[in-house]
Image (cartoon, rainbow, N blue to C red):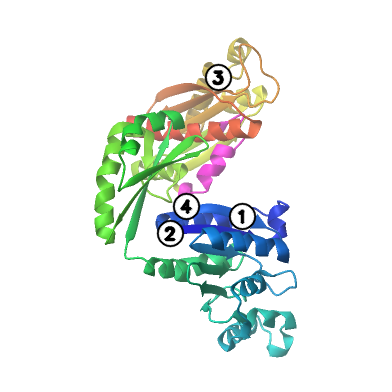
Amino acid sequence: MVAELISVGTELLLGNIVNTNAAYLSKKLAALGINVYYQTTVGDNEGRLAEALQAARERSDLVILTGGLGPTKDDLTKEVTAAAVGRMLVLDEAVKEDITSYFKQKGKNSGDIPQNNWKQAMIIEGATVLRNENGTAPGLIVTEEDTTLILLPGPPNELVPMTETQVIPYLSSLSNTVFYSAMVKLCGIGESQVEMEIADLIEKQTNPTIAPYAKTGEVHLRVTASASTQKEAKELVKPVVKELKKRFGQAIYTTKEEETLEDVVVKALLKRELTLVTAESCTAGLLTGRIVNVPGVSEVLKEGFVTYTNKAKRKLLGVSKSTLKTYTAVSAQTAKEMVKGAAIGSDSDVAISITGLAGPGGGTEEIPVGTVFIGCYANEKVTVKEFHFNGSREKIRELSVVNGLDLLRRCIMNHY
């Protein structure tokens, strides 16, 4: 099955909001074994939306439209779709009752409901209604001979639960084939190197398949198998994941879809009952912020130091004046003294330090922009690694955080 996504909303084209719906739906469709070949974003314009929908119907089996189901005049998705399939809009009493109940929960009676909201009770004739328990715009499934159209509300807090509880079960019912995916996530190895290492597997793949995805500082490999049952599909995936683990070893930090690098680090600390302190310079708290996103981190994280200036490094972490003068702040020696000072000063089991030059200015021939030193203290052992990153100031800082978390993960694994 070939799918296409049409995201409706002028605010998307203007960049006022980020289109998270398309990314979410693409992931969910991929997990179902449905290929997304096209994604289109179109503004609140009847003519352009009609053109986009016509093109999608001609080349795709499944078209999912998001947004444009609101109560205002510029919400045109339902009207344009109805015209495209040659059907009328008709009042659905059940949807009208849902809208009434929604406003009643907010303390409004029928007379207080804005009249334009009743527009949302009009559905495309013959469509299957997807109930919206988080808003007033229902979703719709419109089936044609060659194409299925699914209309979903734009707000993610409405679209996501509707997709999880109604759209995915519906799409799953269309096929006797079951898909199972495992995500193998790697860090500390580049995308090109990963592809070289698995070139033979990709060349001869049939079922399961391996699909590489590059992220900032990471490479994700989605292994997907199809079978008649979930158990059979899972069994097909297992030997491929086992082979990937054999080839990449500690570069793999998880095989769980939703697990992040910081999740793995915090779990490792909790499991070993270790405490952590961070000392950051060029990343200025970004690494600590990632770690703090993880529930339960308060059990392990003691302190976080942002020592942006040399004076702060000396005062808060005990970095010696001679080290800074001789080797500069961007050096292995400074990273080492930062991480030791943080660990000893806070009486923590594990520490991580980052110092570098994110640019865009300030680089020299000896220390070019993108030079970063990351230190890790674990079980009284200090490890310092030197990195040379390319890209914008933001990207260099992000890469520093990812590689800092990865070094932290590996040191915990190897020293405890």
Residue at the image point whose x is 57% and y is 68% from the top = 152
- The location of residue 246, given as percent across then percent down, is 27, 34
Quick one: label 3 or label 2, which is nearer the N terminus? 2
Q: Name the residue under label 1.
A: 40
User: For the residue labelled by badge 2, is the local secondary structure a helix, a strand or a loop?
Assistant: loop
Relative to 365, is 60 above or below? below
Q: Which mark is residue 295?
A: 4
Q: How far apart are marks 2 and 1 (CA)?
A: 18 Å
Quick one: label 1 or label 3, which is nearer the N terminus? 1
Q: Quadrant of residue 177?
A: bottom left
Q: Name the residue under label 3.
A: 334
Q: How far apart are marks 3 and 4 (CA)?
A: 32 Å
**399 or 149: nearer the eye?**
149
Q: Mark 2 points at which residue?
A: 1
Span shown in magenta: 279-298
**357 or 168: nearer the eye?**
168
Q: Distance between the residues labelled 1 and 4?
A: 36 Å
Residue at the image point whose x is 44% and y is 46% from the top = 263
Q: In this view, does 200 lie to the left or right of 279?
A: left
User: For the residue labelled by badge 3, is the local secondary structure a helix, a strand or a loop?
Assistant: helix
Q: Are marks 1 and 4 in contact (CB under 8 Å)?
A: no
- The location of residue 89, given as percent across then percent down, is 63, 81
Quick one: label 2 or label 1, which is nearer the N terminus? 2
